[in-house]
Amino acid sequence: MSLVSVAINIYKNQLTNKKKKQSQKQQNGYNSRLGWVFVSKDFTKETTKAVRTYGSLFNVSKDYTYFTPNTFYRNDLRRLSTLRWINAMSIDIDAKNDENTGMTLPDVQELITAAGLPMPSLIVQTPSKGFHVHWFLEQSKRASDKLNAHYSRIQTCIAEMLKGDINAIGPERLFRLPTDENTVFHSQERVSFDDLCEWFQLVQEQDQQDVHTYKKGFCKGYESLLQHPAVQKILEGVTKGQRDTACYTLALAYKAAGYDEKTAEAYLHNWNQKNTPQMCQIEVKRKVKSAYNGRFHAPSAKKIRELSGMLFSYVIWEEAKPRVERTYSHIEEWEGDVLAFIRAQGGQVSGAQRDLAEQITSSVDAEKKIPYATFKKVVARLEEQEILSKKVSGKGRGASTELTIIDEVKARRTQSEASKKEQDTGSKNNGLNSNTIKDTVVGGRALPLSAGYSLALPKETFLPVLLPTSSTRSKPAPIPGNVPSAFVSALSNRSFVDGRFIFRAWGKIQLAFQAFGITYHSIAATDDYLRLAVDAVGLTVEKKGSMIAGDFQGDECFLKYLFGTMKGLFANYRSDQITQFVEEIEGLGDIKLSHLGMQLEDELKAARVVDRELVKTKLAEIEREQSARQRRKHYHNYSAFDLNASLNQFKLFMKTDD
């Protein structure tokens, strides 16, 4: 099968027949469907070149050996983050270092059939007698973080089933360019990505059944992994054809058990002496390095079964991570944040949905905003539960959405149940099978945002609501690491030591600054702002009491006063800054004043400005000063002109009298 046929079947309209001229791009615009194909002479040295036309691809194929079946939106960076289109599922079956020695095309086809996979579209044989197997997709899939991750999971599973290289994983990888000489199989078969997803799901279900099937060989925990009879059998040494896989698998076992890389390498060099024949020492070192620097945290149970010939399976339990340590939040956690935001605005908010979503941040990290898509899901869920009412007025971009909490008791119950569920998951097991990487986005507990909030209940409602305060908590929560130490000290010195309370207090400080357009980063990075925050704590303690003095009036009362105090302090601070600036510019000459104005204009053009509104105000004051000076000059010149004219008239009058 020629490269021409393969390229057309894979890329279709992602490549053009000839390069577009700049005038055509300007006239027709840039085509977002096109993609860049990377080719390389040696994938280990990353000597890559990007092409975007079929003509260029065919021309460079004479000098280049590898290509990317999937395409990218950048021509200077072949990375997962720059991927545009996924066109094929590709697997590398390596035959180096005595692995898969003697494997033939019928062997590969038999493995594919036994795995329940569809017939591939293309199989290319490599010079080392390995194989690159490709399944072309019926419809190209637009790359995304979620899709890329699932692609890699399916690719890993297929590689394991076909004895492929589980390190050659990722939709951005290079594969050997097909030629008439190295193409050993081709067909017109295509597969949908949904079919591959269904196949993967079936395999996963089977793996879950295997855990029960191999219960006799069950291993619980990484600590006992190396002592399991199946692993001990591999540690006795293996024969030719198993050494590479065994070395990599054992390296992962040592890694999972907590050994550092150097210790694991030393143990595996000793293990290598039991092999017949032994591996090269450099290969042992490479396998260990690959295991410790790779994406897998633990060995594959399936590989241990194959290498040992014994029953083996294991499930590793991992405690759920706190929300503050996770990249993503659960939708129940975002529900609490949305309710808290609306409650803080008096139980009702209105505006464009995107604008509302921009204002809602995570309760444990003010830098993380709720994704717009998640915001819409949360609102829909709360609306279905009859907790929120949603009214939309207008259409298109001018539409305004009004969200109102209509059942505060149910909202509180929903938030409490979500918090309780998060706390329960912290002590329960989060089961992962042996092929699963520890994921930082699952599990966890959130700091309850709702703790201490007062309920805006109707007057006729007399439900007793007992809310925890920082004074009633028996076990303080840890202090979040993103709160400045100076602010923490200001509270802890007054015996406010609970992490939840300190975090909420810092959130009020951030909201106060946000009202003036000051970002979170700027608060922590500006000494004056931190000093104001500490002063706000001191003034609030004077009015609302403290834990150490025993006159504390409650969380809500304290936090509400802190917010107002912070806003007042910053308003006065900004006013003082402007007053001082006006006094300074009055003493500047015209040239220096003009130069200062240009500096402020350049500052406004920068991406990050600490206090943009203050800079704008200063610039306006400079313009007022310049205008005032122009008026004074004009008045002075006009007055001088009038005085000279009057003197001349007086002289004429005197001459006339004479």
Image (tube, helix red, strand yellow):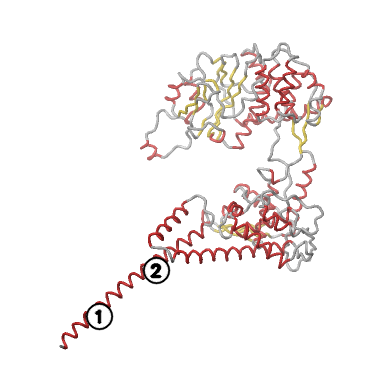
Q: Element at badge 1?
A: helix
Whether pointer 1 and pointer 2 mark residues with C-beta atoms closer than 8 Å, the reply is no
The residue where tag 2 is placed is: 628
The image shows residue 256 at horizontal and vertical percentages of 74, 30
The quarter of the rendered structure image containing the C terminus is bottom left
Q: Amino acid at mark 1?
A: Ser
Residue at image position (57%, 18%) is 123
Give the residue type at disc 2: Ala
For the point 48% across and 50% down, which residue is it? 606
Task: Give the answer, above or below, for where 101 lies relative to 502.
Answer: above
363 left or right of 584?
right
- Please name whichever residue, 142 or 449, is drawn nearer the observer in this view of the structure: 449
Q: Which residue is most to the right?
A: 216
Percent across and percent down for residue 164 are 64, 21
Check disc 2 and report its element: helix, strand or loop.
helix
Q: Quadrant of residue 151?
A: top right
Where residue 209 sits, quadrant-wise, is top right
Q: Position of residue 617 (x, y in %)?
A: 48, 62
**Vertical side of 387 occupied by 113: above or below:** above
Taking the spot 40% from the left edge, 59% from the top edge, the residue there is 592
Which numbered marker is on residue 646? 1
Q: CA distance from mark 1 to mark 2?
A: 27 Å
Residue for point 76% across, 53% down: 416
How crowded pointer 1 is (Cα within 10 Å; few <14, some 14-19, many 20+) is rated as few
Of tags 1 and 2, the one toward the viewer is 1
- Residue 171's mark? none
The answer to which image quadrant residue 330 occupies is: top right
Percent position (x, y) of residue 384?
Answer: 68, 52
Q: Is residue 169 above or below residue 321?
A: above
